[in-house]
Amino acid sequence: MFNDKPILIKITHSDSDLLKRYSWFRQQPGCNWIITGSGEGDLPELAITRHGVILKNGAEQLSFHPSMALIRLINLLRGESDRYLEATQLKAGDALIDATLGFGSDALIGAWAVGEKGSVLALEQSPILAAIVQDGLNHITEIIPNAKNKDKHAAWAALERASRRIEVHWGEHSEYLKHIPSRSVNVVYFDPMFRQTCKQSDSILPLHQWSVHNPLDHGAVIEACRVAQNRVVLKERKNSSEFRRLGFDILLGGRYSPVDYGVILV
């Protein structure tokens, strides 16, 4: 994890839009920025370009993309099921707290499910990930392709609408949840899986190196149960001992999936 390491921030052109974006990043809390020209050559680098924002560390590069959320939404719009939505039971108008935002795929699906009258509060302990995802959501229209496929076009449009419903906050979820009123949201969701990797997840390694790898604290689950009206949901690896340790009942389903979902009804 590189959250304490300084990051060189630079802008490739001086047009007004990029300057505004550059200024916005420099104001984000928790990030340890080094201005171009004043750092060492081996520092990680955040490049703000006309083609997007790119976080580089050696050979690894990271930029925002909805990733699997797009494929999942295409399937949902075709009437197929989604295990995350089966576990969370989100419906139109609900309020969701995604306590482990990561790169936001589940938050986007949740924001789609709760609709225009719903809301998603997304918490991320890594300051640079929180900043990159919020920036990506703010500028999601810039990465939407001119899709000729009707299903992809509809899914991108739905993702763009969903992105407006997500409010990102940087911070440690245990502390943040303590300040949220009891029974004030419908669902609290945890996905702490980025603390581990395996060969099958090599594609997320650029994200993994910037994420926080701490196991989920039991105190955070207690706070989540206080805050939620309906349920608290945990995503973990199949057969993980975390479900038992934290008091979650595992949902049946996903026989061939490498992950399971656990639920606490409140």
Image (cartoon, helix red, strand yellow):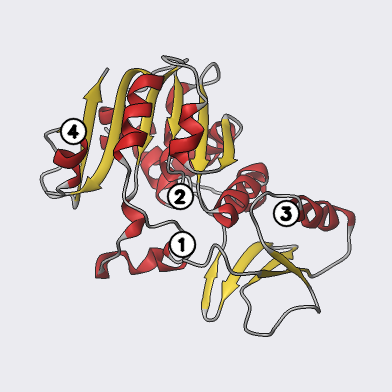
- Upstream in the sequence, badge 3 or badge 1? 3
Check residue 242 in the rendering and tell me which mark sits there, or answer none.
none
Residue 198: x percent and y percent?
26, 67
First along the sequence among labels 4 and 1 = 1
Q: Which residue is mark 1?
A: 207
Judge the density around disc 4: few (<14), some (14-19), many (≥20) Cα neighbours within 10 Å: some
Camera-side mark, 3 or 4: 4
Circle 1: is it few (<14), some (14-19), or many (20+) Cα within 10 Å?
Answer: many
- SS at badge 1: helix
Q: Mark 2 and 4 residues: CB-CB less than 8 Å, in contact?
A: no
Q: Do tag 2 and tag 1 residues touch (Cβ < 8 Å)?
A: yes
**Nearer the observer, disc 2 or disc 4?**
4
Q: Secondary structure at mark 3?
A: helix
Identified at 31% across, 64% down, the residue is 201
Residue 30 drawn above or below residue 112: below
Residue where numbered disc 3 is placed: 25
Q: Identify whether 96 is placed above or below 213.
A: above
Residue at 38%, 27% (x, y): give it: 223
Crowdedness near tag 3: few (<14), some (14–19) or many (≥20) residues, C-alpha within 10 Å: some
- Mark number, residue 102: 2
CA gap, disc 2 to disc 3?
18 Å
Residue 82 in sight from this viewpoint:
no
Q: How many marks?
A: 4
Kindly identify which residue carries mark 4: 247
Please indicate whether residue 130 sits to the left or right of residue 22 in the image: left
Could you say where residue 2 lies in the image, as x and y percent from the top left?
A: 52, 67
SS state under label 4: loop
Q: Residue at x 70, y 83 (%)?
A: 40
The amino acid marked with disc number 2 is: Gly
